[in-house]
Image: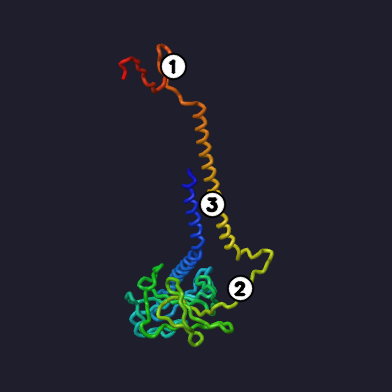
Amino acid sequence: MKLNLLLPSLVMLVLVLLLCFESLPHIRAQSTTSSAKALDAVLQQYAYKVLVNPKTGTIYNATQLPSNLTGIEVSALRLRSGSLKRKGFKMYNEFEIPQGLIVSTYVERLVLVYQNLGKFSTRYYPLANHTYLTPVLGLLVYDSSNLSATNLSELDISASGDPILVKFRNVKPAPHGAVAECVWFDLKGSSSFSIVTGGNTCSTSQQGHFSIVVKSTTPPAPPVPSAHGGKKKSGKVWIIVGSIIGGLALLVLLLFLALWMNKCTKKKKMQRMERVAELGEPLQMASVGDTKAPAATVTRTQPTLEHEYAP
């Protein structure tokens, strides 16, 4: 293998490593969105379990959540889509649903699943450089034709008239000089901000997850040295550093391997040339009677007799 053929592969390896490190934040964002969608599916399943012979317009609270989700509140509300559009629903926990709610795909009945993520808010909906003043609340709409169905997709809804109001309870006071904002996470995990009205109310025309936040103004305190050295916080940093060092070590190893193979190739070539020089060019053997003798492969120019008639 020649060195000039291996160098492009080494350069490609370096580019791949750089792209991997640059894509780490994007990968983490995708992982967070996937976790939130998985949580929605689980909560939808537990919300539907409490809808046993449900009465239209009655709120049912799910109380049998798994132990690893303790602290999350889930409710289910079954309504007729036509009635919801004509009348709305005055107060579904913190959500006030007005008249004129339109469902793009017609279904006879639908279920509105309410979520209060409580202490899990920052885990499933992390928001950089912001502090939550309220838990994240969710309102998702599903088809209710099959109450034993799981992994349902949300129905596409929109408020055609007045917006849906989210009236939060127990809003933490904002730090001095900070301005509270409403944040809305759509079904794909993207966030958008709007103003808070009345100190505790956000408005929306679509479903999703909602909270009141404030921009973080105080920089994080430096880590305090301890016997354990903050192992949990620095664990991810060491993983990244270790990956970079490992990639560079692999690159150096491949470079040395390429140089060694190139050196071996040249050495073998020199040894082959030396053997040929020592042995000389072998002559072909020809039979003369009962013996064999070397014979030249090319004869010299045949001599001609000189005489007076020669030109």
Q: Residue furthest bottom?
A: 198
* Amino acid type of the residue tagged 3 in the rendering: Leu
Foreground mark, 1 or 2? 1
Work out whether residue 142 or residue 76 is closer to the camera in this orientation and state it.
142
Q: Which residue is mark 3?
A: 251
- State the image coordinates of residue 85 (x, y, percent, origin top left): 35, 82
Question: Mark 2 or mark 1, which is nearer the start of the sequence?
Answer: 2
Foreground mark, 3 or 1? 1
Q: Residue furthest right?
A: 227
Neighbor class of circle 1 (other Cα within 10 Å; few <14, some 14-19, many 20+) is: few
Q: Is residue 237 left or right of residue 6?
A: right
| Secondary structure beneath label 3 | helix
For the point 51% across and 63% down, the residue is: 24
- State the image coordinates of residue 277 (x, y, percent, origin top left): 50, 29
Work out whether residue 29 or residue 50 is closer to the camera in this orientation and state it.
29
Task: Work out which quarter of the rendered image holds the C terminus and state it.
Answer: top left
Q: Which residue is mark 2?
A: 220
Q: CA distance from mark 3 to mark 2?
A: 37 Å
